[in-house]
Amino acid sequence: MAKVTPALLRRPAAAEYLAVSAGIFDQMVRDGAMPRPRLFGSIKLWSIRDLDRAIEALPTDGEERSSTWDDV
């Protein structure tokens, strides 16, 4: 059976997807570097597509950060 890749991730999995701790992930969300979660009832979920877009918008080493997730 084929492995299914989830479209939405809970907070710990979203942090793991970015290879950072949950605390660093929370700070990135607060700073606008990562998107806010989507809500399914009271469950907070992060879209992999949203995360991928935010990752691509992160500055490269030596580049100044000029935008936040709100600007994307």
Image (cartoon, rainbow, N blue to C red):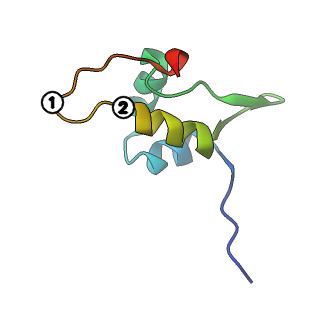
The residue that mark 2 highlights is: 58
* Other-residue count near label 2 (Cα within 10 Å), few / some / many at <14 / 14–19 / ≥20: some
As rendered, which of 51 and 20 lies closer to the eye? 51
Q: Is residue 55 above or below residue 3?
A: above
* Other-residue count near label 1 (Cα within 10 Å), few / some / many at <14 / 14–19 / ≥20: few
Residue type at mark 2: give it.
Leu
The residue that mark 1 highlights is: 62
Q: Secondary structure at mark 2?
A: loop
Residue 32: give its label.
Answer: none
Structural distance between the alpha carbons of marks 1 and 2: 12 Å
Residue farthest bottom in this picture? 1
Q: Decide if residue 23 is on the left or right side of residue 1.
A: left
Residue at position x 30%, y 20% from top?
Answer: 65
As rendered, which of 24 and 34 lies closer to the eye? 34
Residue at position x 54%, y 48% from top?
Answer: 13
Residue type at mark 1: give it.
Gly
Quarter occupied by the N terminus: bottom right
As rendered, which of 69 and 44 lies closer to the eye? 69
* Residue 15 locus on image (x, y percent): 47, 42
Q: Secondary structure at mark 1?
A: loop
